[in-house]
Image: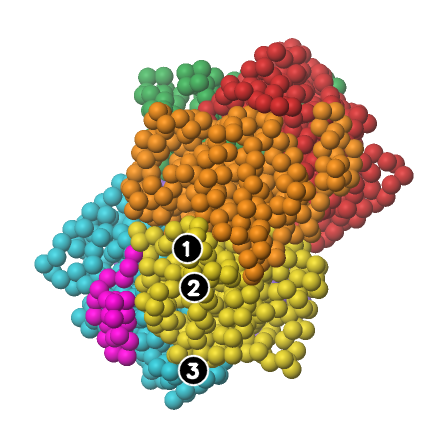
Chain colours: A cyan, B yellow, C orange, D red, E green, F purple
Amino acid sequence: MNGATVQILVVNPNTTASMTETIASAARSVAGSWTEIVAVTSSMGPVSIEGYYDEALAVPGLLVEVATGERSGAQAAIIACFDDTGLDAARAMANIPVIGICEAALSMASFIAQRFTVVTTTERSRVPVEGLVQRYGMAGRARVRAADIAVLALEDMASDALLKLKDQIAHAIEEDRAEAIVLGCAGMADLAAELQREFGVPVIDGVGAAVKQAEALIALGLSTSKRGAYANPLAKPYRGALKSFAPGPLAAE
Amino acid sequence: MNGATVQILVVNPNTTASMTETIASAARSVAGSWTEIVAVTSSMGPVSIEGYYDEALAVPGLLVEVATGERSGAQAAIIACFDDTGLDAARAMANIPVIGICEAALSMASFIAQRFTVVTTTERSRVPVEGLVQRYGMAGRARVRAADIAVLALEDMASDALLKLKDQIAHAIEEDRAEAIVLGCAGMADLAAELQREFGVPVIDGVGAAVKQAEALIALGLSTSKRGAYANPLAKPYRGALKSFAPGPLAAE
Amino acid sequence: MNGATVQILVVNPNTTASMTETIASAARSVAGSWTEIVAVTSSMGPVSIEGYYDEALAVPGLLVEVATGERSGAQAAIIACFDDTGLDAARAMANIPVIGICEAALSMASFIAQRFTVVTTTERSRVPVEGLVQRYGMAGRARVRAADIAVLALEDMASDALLKLKDQIAHAIEEDRAEAIVLGCAGMADLAAELQREFGVPVIDGVGAAVKQAEALIALGLSTSKRGAYANPLAKPYRGALKSFAPGPLAAE
Amino acid sequence: MNGATVQILVVNPNTTASMTETIASAARSVAGSWTEIVAVTSSMGPVSIEGYYDEALAVPGLLVEVATGERSGAQAAIIACFDDTGLDAARAMANIPVIGICEAALSMASFIAQRFTVVTTTERSRVPVEGLVQRYGMAGRARVRAADIAVLALEDMASDALLKLKDQIAHAIEEDRAEAIVLGCAGMADLAAELQREFGVPVIDGVGAAVKQAEALIALGLSTSKRGAYANPLAKPYRGALKSFAPGPLAAE
Amino acid sequence: MNGATVQILVVNPNTTASMTETIASAARSVAGSWTEIVAVTSSMGPVSIEGYYDEALAVPGLLVEVATGERSGAQAAIIACFDDTGLDAARAMANIPVIGICEAALSMASFIAQRFTVVTTTERSRVPVEGLVQRYGMAGRARVRAADIAVLALEDMASDALLKLKDQIAHAIEEDRAEAIVLGCAGMADLAAELQREFGVPVIDGVGAAVKQAEALIALGLSTSKRGAYANPLAKPYRGALKSFAPGPLAAE
Amino acid sequence: MNGATVQILVVNPNTTASMTETIASAARSVAGSWTEIVAVTSSMGPVSIEGYYDEALAVPGLLVEVATGERSGAQAAIIACFDDTGLDAARAMANIPVIGICEAALSMASFIAQRFTVVTTTERSRVPVEGLVQRYGMAGRARVRAADIAVLALEDMASDALLKLKDQIAHAIEEDRAEAIVLGCAGMADLAAELQREFGVPVIDGVGAAVKQAEALIALGLSTSKRGAYANPLAKPYRGALKSFAPGPLAAE
């Protein structure tokens, strides 16, 4: 592989720019020297994603960002929300590979631990993340805990978010036989190294995992199969407020 | 139970009004005499839902319809798309029960057959429906076939859609040991009785199944638990084109 | 659907008439105004069903009641024991749909909660109910607890049965992350509303759930598929004490 | 282990004595020289067991035989019907171990093959046997075929039953990647050796497998745990035609 | 079956001869009077098997013993390590049946209990045993505990190994709803009877279970299918220190 | 991440040096410019790995290579056999991360396809690979085919190996609904690009996938958790031919 620059789009699907900074910084800290990280904040939707409703409303905004990024030359896209919000829709829409940070983190954990625990933010996110654990084939080896932290509290130095997170990690190691910890929110991306040192077990951040996964797919010349459920959306009219999403317009415009 | 009228909202989450007619008619044909069916067409999104992308973009529109319907007095809501599009988000948002036609159909089939086959429209929908079969605990007993029918072709008398559907039903009975057939698209709602007569096995339409399920929940005084993942969305700002969805405004306005 | 009367048979497969009263009352309280509930007590077998042995011996009696009810015009039958005792045999024998209260309750719960707990009576019933949870595809979302209550104690106002039941519900909500509770015995059918008020989560009684499921199947014109395992029993001699059960005699007599 | 005689009860739960002869002969051909096989025919119920209805009606008769056998000194009991009819009830009732021939055959197959196929008689039995395959943890490695043979045709030399059975075995080896064959009916017990020679893969008969399993449990001093679901039935009145089954009377009389 | 002598090879795959004595004694105490137990100690590898690394290094030695035993007339072989170390390789190599003590113990337990717990030695072995529980289809009914005992401490009368083992058994009965206990190490083979008496639930030792399973397969004329994954290894050169294992030499020498 | 060189060890666990060349070339073609690939051939064991027996005998040799490589400064190790031979043992032994090419390939495929098929070499390897598919949580989405190719035939230009491989890929796309193909043998590593062009679906080679996975773990500062089953082996004597493997000597020498 030569040293040609690759561009990876990292979409923060919530609309809080300060969290995008955290995510971008984490992404850049692990990216290869030949990788350009383009981090964007969604321009429509909730300021944080806590549960199914926020998740659903974050999707149109992130689709716009993925489509825009692909047209601008990104070779892979990352959706930086641990619920893997809109992942299937983005994968069908795009021709570049799209990575969810939950699937990337769980996959990464599976190479270094037999049992691990995801610590996510709120109870609203716990069952959705358990659904992803099931979907990604990890139900036999991973458990999910919620630390009762508001997502935006992770941006607030003065909050007790870090204490609550550490408390759940300690419980996971003690009670779940966790051999590794997966941080269950993009807003925790900057904490992995510190927590790994403190607890003495591998601590995996999904943003970093997804960056390396995206680099891997690009290097291997692999992208989403367009056979089956990820075939590009059929051209058809879209009506009302979302009519700009009609396939064709969005992809080609 | 007294004879008081109940109102059930049936949302067609695609934006094709003629399909809403088919759905409304099927719903009314099985509803109790005391039930008022309020059928609405989403005002924004794709004209048909074929795959993950269309699904995701149909969600904001259907959420508006569910919220509006709840404010107008509906006691239960049905999402009349076989992908159960937006079901989790709607359930979290609403305080009335919300039913997906796929889950209702699979559940209904499970009471009358040990093995059954879902016949859906396109290959784009097949894996998503298999995902639902897995989620609803039916993976050991249900299979999914795609009839290679465009959803809107079901509205077109002159198309060969019915022939293709019958062909897959015949294969399901012969090759899948199907004891019953589930129609895997809301647009097929008017065909169940005819197909049941022709093939001699139970044929289940999800719209009808969901109407009876909604009536049941209302009669039993049951609604979505607000403990856990379906707790109402937290109040928070929503930005950009979707800011009207910020919880609070949408629910209370 | 017009207002024509439908008749639903509710069989109490144990031989305790007072429990049939509890069951009939619960059934009638949720049935539609057009529905006639015919509640019968089995005339042979144990006075309560607690475990596999009682279950097996309750089957011949309940089959007689289902066959008699079908001949008398019932359009659906409900087996009002949470072990779904004899359900498969009754389904094969009858041409009307037959509903078990466990499957009806679990199905109903699945529409309003992602995680729920069944509270049954004795440890003897716990593993059998867990087996049903597995069979009905709910193993990933439902847990089973036993309250250490003798079934007939539920009929006895002076017993501590209600206290024990409430204690397990409290533990389920606290420890199992239960979003809803399923009452795991037909003898608890009258307690659902009170417990729902007290605990603030949906509480599902299988008898009521089964009545609405039966009404649904009748309204939709659906009955058990006779293709596969539920094909009517073959005509053949039955010997000894049970010779009256030889298929043909029982159905046609 | 010394050479003391052990007595194993083999119950044919259908009421056809000629099939008991086939079963007894197969049992004796593999039993240890120190083992006495006591083979009995149920005195009430269907002449053959084909599907759920026959299964259920065979249970009271087989319980009588197991209880009688235990009182007469049997140290283990075998239920010689491949549906493992009444197994759980018998296990709870008895204090000696009780073995089903399906579970014994599947277990035996699992020691000598990674993939195997059960060939049973009729389509009515196929789903029930698939349910047992699931219950016994073999769903990932075993498939079930039905040879469309009436059970009693196996007793009729002039029938084409053997041809049909061989045809399915050939298909299993070719299409299912079967490394071994399990004979899915007690009435096939005499055919295992011949079929093994003809097809060149292990062919397992459940009757023989159960005899060796029973001998094993006796030699190891193991019997059914009475903790949990197999605790002996509680003493209570049984009414009507089956009142002799009230626990206590049946066990002690 | 006549009284002809059969020979069963029991391989202790660790290199500690005193443990072989414990194993041989347990094997002989349950073997039939016509069975000759040939117990051998592996001549190469670790003195105890605690975790994946020791497991892997124990395999060449045990393969030599199985091959030697088969040439010397053994009719079945048992690998007396609860990790079922090398089982698949030995099964492919040998033409006699090969039994692992874990699979034999789990299978035996499944005939007498619905829920049971394996108590193994160290945390290093816990996940591997959980993997076997999954592989053998028992994940829904069996749990695994580690008693924090070094394997060789089981040979040391003065150690607190027995106390630790009893402590975990007590916890299993109390917290896991265990109806039976499986001893998860060959070195515990002599303790089953004592522990069964003390705790009042069935206690299963895998060595004894495997002996009876081996006798059963021999009596039934069954051996490993040579179709599929257990086909004999292909003849090919083996290089370096293990060249004597080249198929052909090892089998035929 | 700075541009510092990282060293990745790729062990060919069979003893055929020409296959190591194929593997090394594939590894280098996708490795980052800062990555040094050190490819080694095992010095003991079979010339190809086809089935459980060869697998087991390849383990000591590959452990030596992994230990030697770690001492020489490798930061991650890859076991280049699709059976993931010896992976667990190597992971426990080493302190650097160890990657199997099967797990790497399946993981990579899961990011770009919902359904995919592994095409491996011989029937002897098919069930073992199915076992890995199950272990890695992909049983619901991946199938395994065997192309009936001897492993070393892949090194022989004149063989019909490529034709057989293409034939199975065509069948997989047609019959398995495969959206992507995973090459199920390290010896196929050079064929991925050509096959991807020919068949128009993503084709994944495990060697390349593992190189990128290894680079990812190194960049993220992650290695195997030493808590649980992958804790380093305990120091203890090893006897006989393998005594040099006693933990300590091997690691420290």
Q: Is residue D62 or residue E88 the one in the foreground?
A: D62
Who's the residue at 53% across and 49% down the image?
C35
Residue C147 x %, y %: 38, 31
User: Are circles 2 and 1 on residues that touch, CB within 8 Å?
Assistant: yes
Q: What residue type is labelled 2?
A: Ile
Q: Which amino acid does label 3 sit on?
A: Tyr
- The dot on residue A90 is none
| Residue B132 appears in the figure | no
Q: What residue type is labelled 1?
A: Ile
Q: Alpha-carbon distance for marks 3 and 1?
A: 34 Å
Q: Which of marks 2 and 1 is nearer the N terminus?
A: 2
The residue indicated by pointer 3 is A238
How many C-alpha atoms fall within 10 Å of the one at disc 1: few (<14), some, or many (≥20)? some
- The dot on residue B218 is 1
Q: Alpha-carbon distance for marks 2 and 1?
A: 9 Å
Q: Which of marks 3 and 1 is in front?
A: 1
Question: Which corner quadrant holds the C terminus of chain B?
Answer: bottom left
The residue indicated by pointer 2 is B8
Q: Alpha-carbon distance for marks 2 and 3?
A: 26 Å
Q: What segment is highlighted magenta in the picture?
A: B231-253
Q: Are marks 2 and 1 on the same chain?
A: yes
Circle 2 — which element?
A: strand
